[in-house]
Amino acid sequence: MQGQIVKIVSNLYTVSNEQGTFPCHSRGKFRMDKVTPVVGDYVKFDEKECYILEILPRKNALIRPVVSNVDQGLIVTSVKHPDFSSNLLDKLIVTLEFHNIEPILCFSKWDLLSPEEAKEMEDVCDYYQKIGYTVVKNTELEKIQKLLKGKTTVFTGQTGAGKSSLMNHLDSTLHLETGEISEALGRGKHTTRHVELMEMYGGKVLDTPGFSSLDFTEMKKEDIRDSFIEFANHPCPFRDCMHQFEGECEVKKNVENGNILSSRYENYIKFINSKNGRS
Ligand SMILES: Nc1nc2c(ncn2[C@@H]2O[C@H](COP(=O)(O)OP(=O)(O)OP(=O)(O)O)[C@@H](O)[C@H]2O)c(=O)[nH]1
Ligand SMILES: [Mg+2]
Ligand SMILES: [Zn+2]
């Protein structure tokens, strides 16, 4: 039988298909092959013995969060509490771009901003929209529902940003655990501990545990550069320009004249420098 892994807890793999859900184990074979089944994998399994026999080829696979066969990523980013981090947002965008997963930007917790702070954030949102991304607020439920149709969407973003809360709002039959941000530590504690795939609005969604850091082990500097999609709008006279030290660089010029958001460029430089062994 074939099915899709919808949840993994310790060594128990929940495989789902039209016939139902099957709690399965994995074979030692996978450990020898150094292949680990992940949530999102389509698999062949033995429904009597409840063993996964084979992982079918993946369309794509992310390391953080660990999921496969994803079409788009809804990046839930809080504008406050935890404070907005352009660094983390750009990291997530770059990672998704690299894996050919369409990023959708979803900003949460606007209710915690003063009108002046909200205006500043709106400008940031406008920029991301201008360069081609779909940008929504976590309160725009109908808009989000439409985006989910016919797609597999991974909900990703910082811990405490409101991924699980948003899913509960989108589908009131869900009762995903959500958590208060730990004030004492000054950073979120992880409430969601497992990746879980669910069906919703004619699509599939994956709730994932948030994280507080991310790196670019899989990517080369050039991959990072090419994942800043707006740079391509400003072709450089230098072939293969890294937009860092070159004098007549068009990207640098457009950062100076304000066409490229300076935080985007600063994050880009930080990301490529982190590949030098320092950040
Ligand atoms: N004020 C405000 N609080 C929100 C909003 N969205 C979520 N929260 C709160 O933020 C806290 C964290 O929400 P969760 O949904 O657990 O966050 P998460 O992204 O799933 O976190 P992890 O599972 O740890 O990755 C909860 O206390 C929510 O009630 C919002 O739009 N405004
Ligand atoms: Mg959660
Ligand atoms: Zn350049």
Image: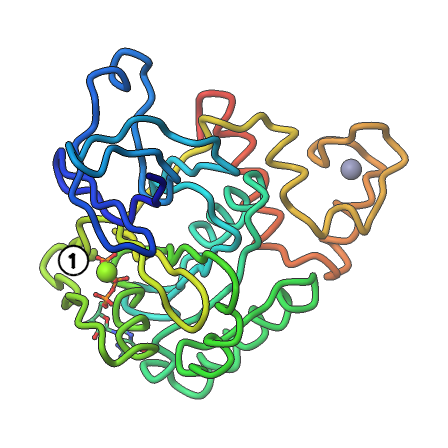
Q: Residue furthest right?
A: 237
Residue 149 position within the rendered picture, expressed as x and y whole percent measured from the top left = 51, 69
Residue 72 position within the rendered picture, expressed as x and y whole percent measured from the top left = 51, 55
Amino acid at dot 1:
Thr
- The residue carrying mark 1 is 191
At a point 44% along the width and 70% down the height, the residue shown is: 107
Residue 102 as seen in the image, left or right of residue 66: right
Q: Residue furthest front?
A: 48
| Residue 82, picture quadrant | bottom left
Residue 49 as seen in the image, left or right of residue 80: left
Residue 130 as seen in the image, left or right of residue 137: right
At a point 33% along the width and 22% down the height, the residue shown is: 35
Front residue of 46 and 205: 46
* Residue 27 in the image: above or below residue 202: above
Q: Residue furthest top?
A: 32
**Ligand 1 is found in which quarter of the picture?**
bottom left
User: Circle 1 sits in a helix, a strand or a loop, which is it?
Assistant: loop
Residue 125 position within the rendered picture, expressed as x and y whole percent measured from the top left = 56, 71
| Residue 110, picture quadrant | bottom left
Give the position of the N terminus as an image quadrant. top left
